[in-house]
Amino acid sequence: QVQLVESGGGLVQAGGSLRLSCAASGSIVGNPAMAWYRQAPGKQRELVAIISSSTSSNYADSVRGRFTISRDNAKNTAWLQMSSLKPEDTGVYYCVLFWGPTYWGQGTQVTVSS
């Protein structure tokens, strides 16, 4: 059974920074791709950033240049460093692991005040 535990969300003013963490545990073989999704109130869930086992990454246009995804393969941990936050970045952020089935974390709330 694979579990993902996110942490690091909170309330921050516009222009501030937050760092989200995602720790994966369970019988994980190899270094499957990991990603961060978010869901804003009243909107569909969207991909924010994704990182492969080789640490190549890709970002949504709305966050490119402001967010950085990284990982530690030895620890099965991923991070999302968010800078220059905007009110439109508000939402629940989910960590995702692509390995066989897709595993989702429980989500962590990020609120950016104007």
Image (spheres, rainbow, N blue to C red):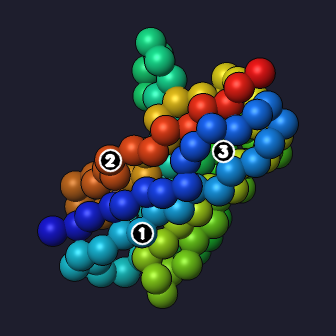
Q: Mark number for residue 106?
A: 2
Q: Residue furthest bottom?
A: 74
Query: Do callouts 1 and 2 mark residues in contact (Cβ within 8 Å)?
Result: no
The relative height of residue 114 versus residue 1 in the rendered view (above or below) is above
Determine whether the residue tagged by mark 3 lies in a helix, strand or loop.
Answer: strand
| Spatial CA span between label 3 and label 2 | 21 Å
| Residue at (22, 79) in percent of width and height | 27
Residue 54's x, y, as percent? Answer: 58, 74
Percent position (x, y) of residue 10?
58, 43
Mark 3 Cα within 10 Å, few/some/many (few <14, many 20+)?
some
Q: Name the spot of residue 98 as percent of width and height, x first.
A: 35, 58
Residue bearing the label numbered 1: 23
Q: Quadrant of residue 59?
A: top right
Residue at 34%, 52% (x, y): give it. Answer: 105
Q: Which residue is drawn at 48% across and 87% down?
A: 74
Q: Label 1 is placed on what type of residue?
A: Ala
Q: In which quarter of the image is the C terminus?
A: top right
Amino acid carrying label 3: it is Tyr
Q: How crowded is mark 1: few (under 14 residues within 10 Å), some or many (20 or more)?
A: some
Residue 29 visible to the viewer: yes
- Badge 2 density bin: few <14, some 14–19, many ≥20, Cα 10 Å: some
- Residue at 39 percent of width and 44 percent of height: 107
Task: Check the picture and name the quadrant holding the N terminus.
Answer: bottom left
Q: Can residue 50 be seen in this view?
A: no
Is residue 6 placed above or below 42 in the rendered structure?
Answer: below
Would you identify the image quadrant in which residue 25 lies?
A: bottom left
Any mark on residue 59, and which? 3
